[in-house]
Image (tube, grey):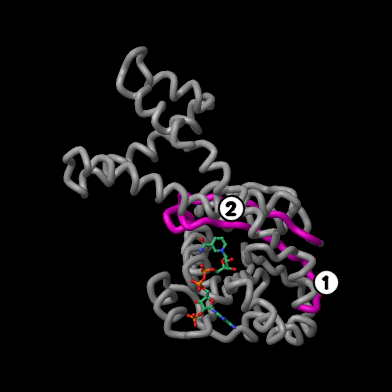
Amino acid sequence: MSTTFGFIGTGNMGGALAKAACRAVPPKQVVLANRTPAKAEALAEELGTGIVTTNEDIAAQCDLIFLGVKPQVMPQMLAGIADTLARREKQVVLATMAAGLTCQRIGELARTGCPIIRFMPNTPVALGAGVVQYCGKYVTQEQMDDFAALLAPAGLVDPLDEGLMDAASCVSGCGPAFADLFLEALADGGVACGLPRDKAMRYAAQMLEGAARMALESGQHPGALKDAVCSPGGTTIQGVRKLEESGFRAAAMNAVIAAYEKTLGL
Ligand SMILES: NC(=O)c1ccc[n+]([C@@H]2O[C@H](COP(=O)([O-])OP(=O)(O)OC[C@H]3O[C@@H](n4cnc5c(N)ncnc54)[C@H](OP(=O)(O)O)[C@@H]3O)[C@@H](O)[C@H]2O)c1
């Protein structure tokens, strides 16, 4: 790819994605801008990217532009680059990660009919173990493929209908917070039973990673994997009984549904 890639907003998510991009293309093809320039400068230094510049310069130069600002900042940020985008002769693709903002809305805010990719990353993209769903408007298959190839080092990169993006974001985008709560609670349980905190945390985290990998790599239903751990009359089934009694499954389902309703403004 000889394209140049711009990142406007190099906070937690923009920064993590810029890191992933730098594993897919030469870092000199990646250009950064951030409201507080020192943050982009530190990242550029770490990754060996091209210049740190302004939003307007990225809007004028780059072929694929990642919009890494918060949803509430998006109108004002896009208003600031709309004229520059309108003057472009070469086609530009905008890639938005803002929760709840559709491709249509981004196009309206940027006052452009240019191709737009909407995607939903999660925090583990920083480790290459993330999930990214993506969809597009006015985008060619080649542009979608280039986008997916660029973010491949971030983890699983999966195309999805735009109508399902909000639901997906409530599973994998919000999910790390839900999983961290479970992780902390498991470790607390270990501490209550006498384990040192650091060991309890490491065992619980490694166990969760292993259980997730078993489900992904075996393709088995989680119910079957659970059954394989629960010996008749044994200890694990007593723990499962307590989780069921406490409404664990309903709590997890309701967490996703509550996040979804909030996204839809219900
Ligand atoms: N965090 C997640 O788990 C997650 C998951 C999925 C999607 N997202 C999406 O990712 C986007 C960014 O979220 P985040 O968590 O990375 O937020 P964040 O850490 O606050 O990063 C936002 C960055 O945007 C910069 N910024 C603000 N206004 C700007 C402007 N006008 N021009 C250029 N840069 C500007 C900020 O600069 P300063 O340094 O000056 O503050 C900050 O570095 C959001 O749209 C969010 O919905 C996040």
Give the alpha-carbon distance from disc 1 to disc 2, as whole Å.
Answer: 24 Å
Residue 161 in the figure: left or right of residue 34: right
**Residue 91 picture quarter:** bottom right
Residue 92 in the figure: left or right of residue 186: right
Specify few, some or many for label 2: CA neighbours under 10 Å numbering under 14, 14-19, or 20 or more: many
**Residue 139 picture quarter:** bottom right
Tell me if residue 219 can be seen. Answer: yes
**Residue 70 picture quarter:** bottom right
Residue 262 percent across, percent down from the top left: 64, 59
Are the two marked residues, 1 and 2, in contact with CB atoms closer than 8 angstroms?
Answer: no
The magenta stretch spans residue 10: no
Q: Quadrant of ligand 1?
A: bottom right
- Where, quadrant-wise, is the N terminus in this rendering? bottom right
Tell me if residue 4 can be seen. Answer: no
The magenta span reads 110-137
Cβ of disc 1 within 8 Å of ligand 1?
Answer: no
Kind of element beneath mark 2: strand
Q: Amino acid at mark 2?
A: Val
The residue lying toward the viewer, choosing from 208 and 29, is: 208
- Where, quadrant-wise, is the C terminus in this rendering? bottom right
What is the residue that sits farthest to the front in this orientation?
245
Residue 257 percent across, percent down from the top left: 62, 48
- Return the residue at label 2: 132
Residue 226 in the figure: left or right of residue 6: left
Kind of element beneath mark 1: loop
Q: Amino acid at mark 1?
A: Gly
- Return the residue at label 1: 113
